[in-house]
Image (cartoon, rainbow, N blue to C red):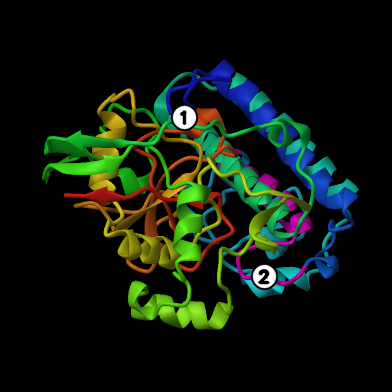
Amino acid sequence: MNFSFRTAAPHELGAALQDAREYTLTLFDCYAEAALDVPSRVPVLSFINPPLWELGHIAWFAEWYVLRDAQSSDPAAAQRTSMLTKGDDWFDPNTVPHRARWKLDLPSAGALKTYCREVLDRALDKLSRTGSDPAALYPYRLALAYEDMRGEALACGLQTLAVSLPRQLANHAIPAWAQGEIRFPGGTIELGSSRDSGFVFDNEKWMHPIYVPAFTMDSTLVSHAQYSEFVADGGYQNPQFWSMAGRTWLMAQERSAPRDWLRDGRHWRCRRFGKEVTLPANEPVRHISLYEAQAYCMWAGRRLPTEAEWEYAAMSGHSAFRWGDLWEWTCSPFEPYPGFSPDAWREYSQPHFMTDQSVRGASFATRLRIRSPKFRNFCAPEREDMFVGFRTCAM
């Protein structure tokens, strides 16, 4: 399904919603096969939801915006009650704190799969009677994008919990690309999305001019081989490469290499979804926190790109600029564009402004239909569970 969800026709949206739900269930079954399908069997981690809760929540989100016609995420915004008697009590993230999700007496996996099927069937039936007006299709696009994003979060959780991947991801290999630098002349660009872009996330609103000075950027992401030189040179032991926040984070981690690296004599191996493999030298280094990316840049005499530089490069059409294998850290704090106002899903962006860092690109686990050089991802600086790496820049 190589089309953008932002402008997809109703029949394309219907097929994509079915595809997304099948993928969600495939990922959930990976947890179930590893006996991690109930909250009590999952380690309580701040960035992972219990898989059973996640399954019900994804369907609840679609029901909230598509079937219950909620115009916002306010708990009183839904115009109809949930199909589940305690649906809001279980799955509304605004009223169910993260740690409380492990203590809920949730329905069985079978019951929640039935709920997922009923929500999808009713949503598809409603979509079949909906025209092509963008406003009418907005809830469907939102539900699809959300399920695709939660699907990537489920895939990240499989890596964190050392669970095998489903076949469609397990067979993916990131190709090796020639490394080099690209010199961009700079100039004024239009940062953000235009009003005729179809579906637009609130943090992309609206397109506005910004001047980008000339800069040089890596054509590809920093590889394992490059990063291992930093490790071998004592990069994790030398405080001069680390920011104050980075040093605090590093002392709490007590590590001398990225989290999934394992020493094997004079060589390195890494963990990949429950398996140990030889560190792929030419692949981009992944599962790197912002602090580690910043420390490498300091060691290398380079810097991370700004969010505007990244979008400039991605929109340039330069044949050597490759993106989409891994998310990429930028040096820009995640902040609103001029004139920002939250959309219906109020908690998507606003709570994360100035505390999270802007992350751009996509990963191998990102569905093709939601990839866009305008898409603004974001996460806390200490996060390393995402499929995230980085590239470097210089003036």
- Residues at badges 1 and 2 in contact (C-beta under 8 Å)? no
Query: Which corner quadrant of the image does residue 49 belong to?
Result: bottom right
Q: Residue at x 37, y 48 (%)?
A: 391
Q: Which residues are magenta?
A: 43-66
Task: Give the side of residue 190 with respect to residue 61, left or right.
Answer: left
> Could you tell me how many numbered marks the image carries?
2
User: On the image, numbered disc 1 is attached to which residue?
Assistant: 136
Task: Give the side of residue 379 with respect to residue 129, left or right.
Answer: left
Counting residues from the start of the chain, the first of labels 1 and 2 encountered is 2
Task: Please state the horizontal and vertical placement of residue 393, each as a whole percent of the image.
Answer: 27, 49
Look at the image and say whether residue 336 sits in the magenta stretch. no
Please, what secondary structure does the residue beneath circle 1 have? helix
Q: Residues within 10 Å of mark 2 (few under 14, many from 20)?
A: few
Please, what secondary structure does the residue beneath circle 2 have? loop
Q: Is residue 289 above or below residue 146?
A: below
User: On the image, numbered disc 2 is attached to which residue?
Assistant: 45
* Residue 120 appearing in the image: no
Q: Nearer the viewer, residue 247 or 176?
A: 176
Amino acid type, residue under disc 2 in the picture:
Leu
Q: Main secondary structure of the magenta part?
A: helix
Query: Which corner quadrant of the image does residue 316 belong to?
Result: top left
